[in-house]
Image: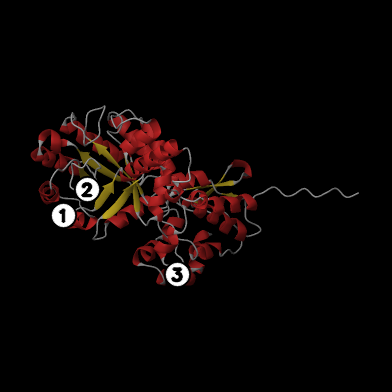
Amino acid sequence: MVMEIVSNCRCSLGTAAASINDSGREALWRLTPSFAGVNPDRGMPSVIASRSHDLQRFSASLDRRGFADRLATAISGHRDRHAEGQLHTRRRSAVRLGVCPVSAQRKPEGGPAIFAPQAMNLAVSGRSLVLAAFLESVAMERATTKLRRLLKRDHALVAAGAFGPMPAKLAEQAGFEAVYMPGGGTALSRLGVADLGLITMTEMVENAAAIAQCVSVPVIADADTGFGNQLNVQRTVREYERAGVAAIHLEDQEFPKRCGSLPGKTLVPLAEAAQKIRAAVAARSDPDFMIIARCDALLVAGMDEVIRRGEAYLEAGADMLFIESARTVDEIADIPQRLPGAHLFNLPTSGKTPYLSADEVTRLGYKLMILPNFTALAAIKAMTEVLAEIRRTGSVAGILDRCATFQEFTELGGLPHLQETEKRFASPTPQPAKT
């Protein structure tokens, strides 16, 4: 039935496709096989385009929660009166997975349908143009697919560090197209401890999920050593995928690991590290989910060992290499020259790596640049100064010009949208009884 609907709407879809960019147009015409149940990406591709808006601008205006609401409204509001069952959206699952909820499967005994990230199968009777109308009004792309697309550009992608949802939302508002969740920032913000392997996989994934749910840009996350052996690595990959993260990096340190800028690091044997990368690649369900291999050998064993390990990690299936703790511009430049493939450049806050610009990093051959903890350092300094002044004066009068307004505070938390939703689903006002 859905295939007939799509076929009947090709004219409208063609009009929409003509108004968007190449990426959106290609994805739009992948719609038919995905609706037919043949979807090699195991999720909805970027098939939905706006007739009157640029794809990227429009998709940036919708967070995942708003998208899920809009999908439910579009389908439930326009479905045929004789549709079988009732369509509901499991918003939380859709948002956590970072994909559009696009399949309807009825529960036994005529129960309500549940949306899941599979190929769409709507059991409806009669004609329906909801799909065409919806396809022309909303833009959505999986976070994993979006990240890979962004990394294909000539210029390095810059991911701002975000130790939690609030800095992630601020980074997106500032125009960053990706955010990075650092392990050290997460450990400090959640536990108040340094980056010495004290934080658990569960705590890291929970933080990553909270970040991924509140932004529409891809989230790249620190996954430390994978939190154990190859079996632990596979569970780590599945949990981060489920959290809606687009990419993780796994390092080759012994457990407990430590911050890459600190001395005293030890490495696992090369064969074991390569097998953990193979296990990670095998565990992912979304082929676009990126496995980034981090190598800490530079400070421990030198450049020759870095090359040996980097080649092995690429052969094991890593999508990108992250060579930690380069100390000079020559070392930074040498890494992409001696190792094939895509490279991540880490700009740590320790000062041991030169503070290069995104343009410089691009010219040296890197595709991704992460800024792990600069938002945390800025927050620490600002809060320290404000608290010191309040303690000294006993008043907030002198620090108000350094603070956001209450309106900015509530808007960052999405208060207008939440109030609108609350009003929309408010209980009907009881009518006074007639006498």
Could you tell me residue 12's position as x and y percent? 49, 71
Residue 287 seen in the figure: no
Q: Residue at x 25, y 50 (%)?
A: 369
Taking the image as shown, residue 418 lies to the left or right of residue 22, namely right
> Between disc 1 and disc 2, whose residue precedes?
2
SS of the residue at dot 3? helix
- Of marks 3 and 1, the one in the foreground: 1
User: Residue type at mark 1?
Assistant: Leu
Judging depth in this view, the residue of 238 and 3 nearest the camera is 238
Q: Which residue is mark 1?
A: 364
CA–CA distance between discs 3 and 2? 38 Å
Seen from this angle, which residue lies furthest left?
Answer: 304
User: Residue type at mark 2?
Assistant: Phe
CA–CA distance between discs 1 and 2? 10 Å
Could you tell me residue 409's position as x and y percent? 49, 49
Q: Residue at x 44, y 57 (%)?
A: 140
CA–CA distance between discs 3 and 1? 39 Å
Taking the image as shown, residue 71 lies to the left or right of residue 374, namely right
In which quarter of the view is residue 375 placed?
A: top left
User: Residue type at mark 3?
Assistant: Ala
SS of the residue at dot 2? strand
Could you tell me residue 273's position as x and y percent? 21, 34
> Between disc 3 and disc 2, whose residue precedes?
3
* Mark 1 vs 2: CB contact within 8 A: yes
Q: Which residue is mark 3?
A: 16
Judging depth in this view, the residue of 199 and 151 nearest the camera is 199
Taking the image as shown, residue 71 lies to the left or right of residue 282, namely right
* Mark 3 vs 2: CB contact within 8 A: no
Q: Residues within 10 Å of mark 3 (few under 14, many from 20)?
A: many
The label shown at residue 345 is: 2
Seen from this angle, which residue lies furthest right?
Answer: 435
- Of marks 3 and 2, the one in the foreground: 2
